[in-house]
Amino acid sequence: MAERSYRIRVLDILAEINGVEQILQGKNFDAYASEMMTRRAIERCVEIISEASRHIPIDVKAKYPNVPWQKISAIGNLLRHEYGLVEDIVIWRVAETSLPELKPVIEQILADLPDEAED
């Protein structure tokens, strides 16, 4: 299988952030916490964001030092391997606070990328 460009990975992150926004539209924490399918969908979106972030080159990440890249990467491992320890409120905060803060950075990374960025 051919390696996907990091541009595609950044587009994946943006798509997942947009997906989280759609899924949670009009929901509060209680609604989120009471709907297993919603929780699992958000967790999967966060997992994809985490994995895709690992493919953004270090020099690109270095341009955005206020982004907690290590935490973004680590949450995917938590969801995959320590899922029993994941508290609903943690994922809710990621979805409601962290992802909206990340979105403009991802949009800026995309804006700065040449169309042919393949590394």
Image (cartoon, rainbow, N blue to C red):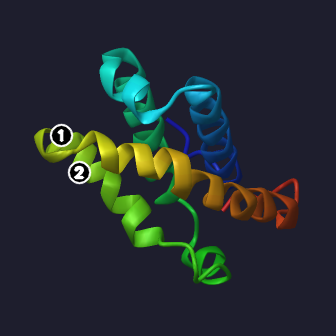
Where residue 111 sits in the image (x, y, percent)? 86, 60
Secondary structure beneath dot 1 equals: helix
Mark 1 vs 2, N-terminal side: 2
Secondary structure beneath dot 2 equals: helix
Q: For the residue marked with disc 1, what is the amino acid?
A: Tyr
Where residue 104 sits in the image (x, y, percent)? 75, 60
Say whether residue 14 is left or right of residue 44.
right
Say whether residue 15 is left or right of residue 77.
right
Is there any visible trace of residue 51 in the rendered image? no
Where residue 8 sits in the image (x, y, percent)? 68, 45
The residue depicted at 48 percent of the width and 35 percent of the height is 45
Q: How many marks?
A: 2
The residue depicted at 13 percent of the width and 46 percent of the height is 85
The residue depicted at 53 percent of the width and 47 percent of the height is 96
Q: Residues within 10 Å of mark 2 (few under 14, many from 20)?
A: some
Where residue 97 sits in the image (x, y, percent)? 54, 55
User: Which quadrant of the figure has residue 110?
Assistant: bottom right
Contact between marks 1 and 2 (CB within 8 A): the answer is yes
- Quadrant containing the C terminus is bottom right
The residue depicted at 85 percent of the width and 67 percent of the height is 112
Residue tagged 1: 83
User: Which quadrant of the figure has residue 14?
Assistant: top right
Q: For the residue marked with disc 2, what is the amino acid?
A: Leu
The Cα atoms of the two marked residues, 1 and 2, are separated by 6 Å
Is there any visible trace of residue 41 in the rendered image? yes
Q: What label sits on residue 28 in the rendered view?
A: none
Q: What label sits on residue 78 in the rendered view?
A: 2
Relative depth, front residue between 56 and 33: 33
